[in-house]
Image (cartoon, rainbow, N blue to C red):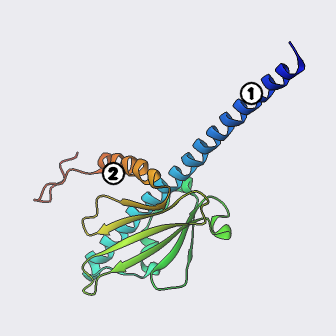
């Protein structure tokens, strides 16, 4: 075998290994982003539950995070970091240590109708290199979270399927009469 054949063979091996590394790296980044999105989905559910608790007392929803945050329960596994952002109804949610310091997470905005009887909570992904998307949940009766993307549209398609499966798994069976039959 001549030297050119050996060199060409080595280049092919290097290129195959490089392609495999890039493919695995892309899958790893997508999985990390999926974990972030599902963690934020849990926070949207918590926000909706806190809004329902406020509504039960005041007959109106609120944009005041100082009222909502004490009503929300955060799993220690998620390592939730929060901080207020400029603008009424905006708050930062990040997951993992130093998330708030690095501003890697979600800007969460509450929007309430003028009569205070309904609203939405919107989480916008900030400081992500590969994905730009929003998770939106309406209340009352916001059982499903929607995902819209400006960058990484296929990501929203996949994450929406995971969110739907997760939410269908957690729905309690409560008929119109109000009696819980899931037990």
Q: x, y (%) of residue 111?
A: 36, 79
Question: For the point 33% across and 51% down, which residue is it?
Answer: 167
Residue 31 placed where, x, y %?
Answer: 55, 46
Mark 2 → mark 1, Cα distance in angstroms: 46 Å
The quarter of the picture where residue 1 lies is: top right
Quarter the C terminus occupies: top left
Relative to 40, residue 56 above or below = below
Q: Which mark is residue 151?
A: none
Q: Is residue 18 left or right of residue 40?
A: right
Q: How far across and how far down the image is residue 129, in percent?
A: 62, 60
The residue positioned 47% from the left and 60% from the top of the image is 40
Q: Is residue 81 above or below residue 170?
A: below
Q: Which residue is mark 1?
A: 12
**Mark 1 crowd level (few <14, some 14–19, many ≥20, 10 Å Cα):** few
Residue, far top = 1
Q: x%, y% of residue 33?
A: 54, 53
SS state under label 2 = helix
Q: Is residue 52 left or right of residue 108?
A: left
- Along the line of sight, the residue nearer the viewer: 137 or 152: 152
Residue at 22 percent across and 46 percent down: it is 182
Asked if residue 62 is positioned above or below residue 152 in the image, the reply reads below
Of 56 and 168, the residue lying toward us? 168
Residue 167 has which mark?
A: 2
Q: Nearer the viewer, mark 2 or mark 1?
A: 1
Residue at 50% x, 85% y is: 87
Residue 160 visible? The answer is yes
Earlier in the chain: of badge 2 and badge 1, it is 1
């Amino acid at each position: 075998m001549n030297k050119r054949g050996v060199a060409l063979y080595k280049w092919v091996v290097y290129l195959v290994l490089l392609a495999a590394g890039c493919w695995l790296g892309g899958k790893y980044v997508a999985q990390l982003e999926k974990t972030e999105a599902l963690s934020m989905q849990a926070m949207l559910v918590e926000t909706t539950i806190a809004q329902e608790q406020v509504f039960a007392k005041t007959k109106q929803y609120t944009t005041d995070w100082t009222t909502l945050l004490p009503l929300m329960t955060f799993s220690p596994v998620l390592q939730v970091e929060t901080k207020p952002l400029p603008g009424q109804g905006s708050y930062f949610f990040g997951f993992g240590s130093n998330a708030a310091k690095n501003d890697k997470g979600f800007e969460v905005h509450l929007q309430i109708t003028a009569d205070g009887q309904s609203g939405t909570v919107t989480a916008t992904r900030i400081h992500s290199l590969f994905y730009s998307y929003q998770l939106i949940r309406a209340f009352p009766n916001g059982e499903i979270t929607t995902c819209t993307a400006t960058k990484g549209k296929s990501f929203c398609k996949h994450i929406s399927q995971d969110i739907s499966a997760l939410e269908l798994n957690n729905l309690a069976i409560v008929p119109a009469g109000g009696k819980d039959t899931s037990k």
